[in-house]
Image (tube, helix red, strand yellow):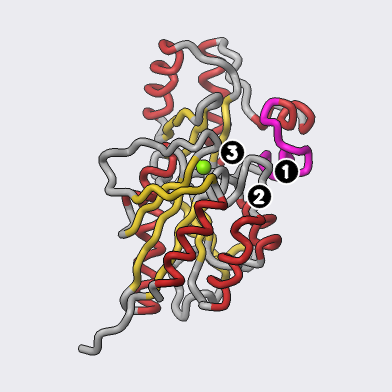
Amino acid sequence: MRETTPKPVIFTDLDGTLLDEQYQWDAAVLALEWLRRSHIPVVFCSSKTRAEQEFFRQAMNCFHPFIVENGSAIFLPQGYFPFGVGGKITDGYELVVLGKPATYVRHILAKIRQQTGWELAGYADMSLAEVAQITGLPPKMAALAMQREYSETIVTRLLPEQVAHLELELAAAGLQMVSGGRFYTVTGTGADKGRAVQFLAGLYEQAYGRILTIGIGDSPNDTPMLAAVERPFLVQRPDYSWLNIPEIPVTKVKGVGPHGWQHIIQQLQKNT
Ligand SMILES: [Mg+2]
């Protein structure tokens, strides 16, 4: 068989990785441009919604498949691969769902709220102004973040015993809850960034033959994505620290967010 150079495929987190704290990516513009010219796919893999990611796809001129709401669903532009992937056709995408619909998540949360009397406030119960205030997002971005299709974010502060009870109740309904720092995100148990990355990597392999999967992240919820790629990278966080994940042989790169991102791509450029 003929030896060929494997085709790189980039899987990247958005917040704190390709985007800085002000949701800007100036430092990575040249890198994105080179990747586009080199036909190297850049797959967003983030907790962000479809609406939010569509905004950044347009703004960055980056039209590859993308993974939304913590691995809840994969959106593939229709016709992106020269074969069907068995997904549902919707709005010009082929859609593969790993999680559960947000309506179901909210229904279960409402039931638990009724049983326990706990507040359990989510984005769906709040006004745009409230979500903008509590997240610090500009109202325009908060509106996109509220367009949840597969998850709900709980903003109520919870005691450890409440968290334990909730986790049990949610698990019984096929749901899971992850802490994202201040808030909790509830998704279907099938939602998994790692599984979503593996699924897409399989399709790229089918399309291109040998591929080299590269993952770039900054925080704990990127761990499943980084574990699923051949070359996992971490960029620096705003305090110049790196996430500590000894279980994964990750390369720590100098540069906060998009600055580190640019360095990783420059390295790739040198080796191609
Ligand atoms: Mg992040």
Helix, strand or loop at mark 2: helix
Which residue sits at x=71%, y=30%? 131
Quick one: label 2, few (<14), some, or many (20+) residues within 10 Å? Answer: many
Regarding residue 71, the answer to whether it shows in the image is no
Instruction: Answer whether labels 1 and 2 touch (C-beta < 8 Å).
Output: yes
Q: For disc 3, does the CB lie below 8 Å from ligand 1? A: no
Quarter holding the N terminus? bottom left
Q: Which amino acid does label 3 sit on?
A: Thr
Q: Residue 103 carries which label?
A: 3
Q: Residue 202 carries which label?
A: none
Regarding residue 166, the answer to whether it shows in the image is yes
Which residue sits at x=37%, y=43%? 223
Q: What residue type is labelled 1?
A: Met
99 or 46: which is nearer to us? Answer: 46
Q: Mark 2 points at which residue?
A: 52
Instruction: Answer whether labels 2 and 3 touch (C-beta < 8 Å).
Output: no
Which residue sits at x=75%, y=26%? 130
State the CA–CA distance, disc 2 to disc 3. 19 Å
Percent position (x, y) of residue 226? 36, 50
Q: Is 183 colored magenta in this rendering?
A: no
Percent position (x, y) of residue 35? 53, 71
Q: Earlier in the sequence, mark 2 or mark 3?
A: 2
238 or 54: which is nearer to us? Answer: 238
Mark in front: 2 vs 3: 2
Q: Mark 1 points at which residue?
A: 141
Which residue ends up furthest to the left in the rendered image?
A: 1
Magenta stretch: give its range. 134-146
Q: What residue type is labelled 2?
A: Glu
Residue 177 vs 4, above or below: the answer is above
